[in-house]
Image (cartoon, rainbow, N blue to C red):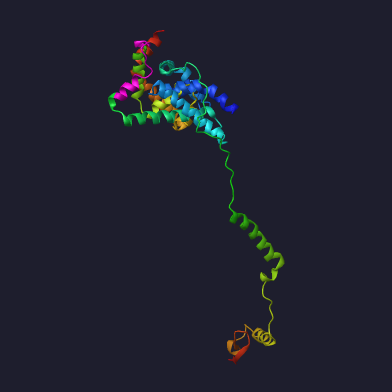
Amino acid sequence: MEQFNDIYKQHYTSIYRLVSKFRVNSHEAEDIVQDVFVKLYLQFNSGNQVQYPKTWLYKVAVNSCINAVSRRKETESLESVSQLEFGTFDSLETDIDQNEQEEIIRNALLKLKEHERLVVILYSEGLSYKEIAEVSGVKFTSVSQNLSRALDKLRPLLKNHYYEMLNQ
Amino acid sequence: MKCLTNEQIQRFIDREMPSLQPDEFQHLTSCPDCKALYNEQKLLAESIKKQINSVAKTPERIPEFQVPASITYTAPRVKRFPLWAKVAALLIPACFVWKMAIKPDKFSEKEFKPTAESIRMYEMCNSVDANTAFQENMIITTVTDANGRVVKCGTN
């Protein structure tokens, strides 16, 4: 189990960061990350080989997030969903501007199609096109197409920040 | 050459070209429109990456991994064959060897033992000359029983 412990330490933060980009609150994120690593532990425990742990973890984490979000959508009304979606990691201490900015970004991401959103989120994680294709299930040849489309759609929605960068 | 598409430019930005594209690269360096689009799109991609990453949270600390109590060690499953398969695996080759090596006569052809009468009949039939007229040849018709014995004989 030494190998598992190494993977756990190496990837815990990146998986947590990935999960937090989805519409889940901090408790849900912790639970999802724990679940993902329990699944990996079970794989190791049953003697199955995980050839690429990083891609495997990302894939399981993404699926768990999608399931968690859709489960919540089924059980709660639209109003409460929107509160949960955007009032996620908030606490009284966090900056209001920061929350507003987060809300704009999350809203912009919601405007994308499911697979485009997934591709953009994985792209922001610094994954290669091959890894993105493997995790998201999008064809390798379609990754760049989905990505450029998603970036084009996000351009007007996130323009303020973009122009700030242009002026720098 | 036509100007590059957003998709092609994105692949250049991310260095994800499937193979070296000298024509496209040449165009990108020489065409001012494509060059401008490349710079703009690169900045856009960086900006969006940055913004999405600003939403992400980092855990305060990495918690110790707790193995859930319900999980117990399960030995890897070993594939077991049923008893009938093991018996069949022994019996089938054994039967084959017995048939082939010990009792080969079962497979050999039946011994041909013609009777004197049938040999005579064969010789008579073979004496027919095919080049002569039908009327000039003697054709013998025989009727044999189940054991091959001639029970009736006739000529033309």
Q: Position of residue A160 (x, y in %)?
A: 35, 13
Q: Where B68 sits versus A99, above or below?
A: below
Q: Position of residue B137 (x, y in %)?
A: 62, 88
Q: Where is residue B129 in the image (x, y as percent from the top left)?
A: 64, 84
Say whether residue A18 is left or right of residue B20. Answer: left
Q: Where is residue B110 in the image (x, y as percent from the top left)?
A: 67, 75
Q: Which quadrant of the view contains residue B103?
A: bottom right
Q: Which quadrant of the view contains residue B94?
A: bottom right
Looking at the picture, tell me which residue is in the foreground, A84 or A100: A84
The answer to whether any part of residue B135 appears in the image is: yes
Q: Assign the N terminus of chain B to one quadrant of the image.
A: top left
Residue placed furthest toward the top: A168
User: Which residue shows up at 43% across the image and 26% down it?
Assistant: A119
The boundaries of the magenta stretch are A80-97
Looking at the picture, tell me which residue is in the foreground, B9 or B111: B111
Q: Assign the C terminus of chain B to one quadrant of the image.
A: bottom right
Looking at the picture, tell me which residue is in the foreground, B44 or A18: A18
In reply to whether residue A83 is colored magenta, the answer given is yes
